[in-house]
Image (cartoon, helix red, strand yellow):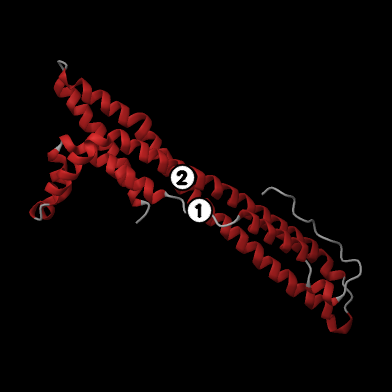
Amino acid sequence: MNTTLPAPVALDTPQAATLASYGDPLLRAIARRADAQGALHEGGAAGLIDALARLALALQAADPASLRRQAGWWGRLLGRDVERQRDADALQPQLGVLLLQAEACAARVQAAAAQRQAAVATSEQAAAALQQWVDAGSQALPVLPDGDGGALQGVLAQRLDHLCRLAALQRSEAAQWQVLLAQDEALLARFRRIADILLPAWKQATLARHVKDQAQRSQRAAQLQAEIAAEVASAQARLR
């Protein structure tokens, strides 16, 4: 939401009850924003990473040596390289379907990223508005009547401290959403590089293996396959 938050009100006729509820119009507006925003959806990053992992495995169907290297000595002893080869062989004919699945997952991540971007803006606006009320109240604090042992000043000071804490909380939430947003954007960038650049280049190199420079084409296909695997591994690392 992008509605304007209430501006600070003047404390012309201060009373203890008024000072104790200083900032209530703003807090109600912030609460209404939160209710309207609703719960943010899970980003779907894990689903996209899994889809990319299946895609990368399918590309290795014609490269058993790569699968053996990835399995390692202990994995080969346990037959994991054979299992991965079997899985890769089953996935290889489904490359088109796997890419469509990855596209669908990426769309969900993109939608979640848009929500998180809105959440960052909402929290930052709330923090700024809270700080405005704190600043306005702090200016009024010294000129409050100091009768009753400064009771009114004590009431407002306590309220301002509460608003300060809420502002800090909003800034912290904005920072957390920003971190998640940056992770989503980095994952989407990796996906687009795989889908738009590396995968088409791999297909072209694979189809061209029958030409004279077969060795060079095969080497290029293997290089692109390794780059795709590296992109997927980097994406998987963000979830650990």
Q: Please tell me which residue is depicted at 35% across the width and 29% down the height of the picture.
A: 197
Q: Which quarter of the figure has residue 194?
A: top left
Chain-order first, disc 2 or disc 1 = 1
Q: Please tell me which residue is depicted at 32% across the width and 47% down the height of the picture.
A: 50
Question: Contact, CB < 8 Å: mark 2 with mark 1?
Answer: yes
Q: Please tell me which residue is depicted at 62% across the width and 54% down the height of the picture.
A: 37
In which quadrant is the C terminus drawn?
bottom left
Q: Does residue 113 appear to the left or right of 171 in the view shown?
A: left
Quick check: 211 above or below 106? above
Which mark is drawn over residue 41? Answer: 1
Q: Is mark 2 on a helix, strand or loop?
A: helix
Cα distance in 3D space between marks 2 and 1: 9 Å
Q: Name the residue under label 2.
A: 108
Quick check: 218 above or below 165? above
The residue type indicated by label 2 comes to: Arg
Q: Please tell me which residue is depicted at 91% across the width and 70% down the height of the picture.
A: 13
Q: Does residue 11 appear to the left or right of 178 in the view shown?
A: right
Of 43 and 121, which appears nearest the observer? Answer: 43
Q: Which quarter of the figure has residue 85?
A: top left
Q: Does residue 11 appear to the left or right of 204 in the view shown?
A: right
Residue occupying the far bottom of the picture: 149
Q: What element carries label 1?
A: loop
Quick check: 213 above or below 92? above
The residue type indicated by label 1 comes to: His
Of 178 and 115, which appears nearest the observer? Answer: 115
Label 1 neighbour load within 10 Å: few <14, some 14-19, many 20+: few
Q: Which quarter of the figure has residue 130?
A: bottom right
Instruction: Give coordinates of residue 7: x percent, y percent.
Output: 79, 56
Instruction: Give coordinates of residue 125: x percent, y percent.
Output: 67, 53
Instruction: Give coordinates of residue 143: x percent, y percent.
Output: 87, 70
Which mark is drawn over residue 102? Answer: none
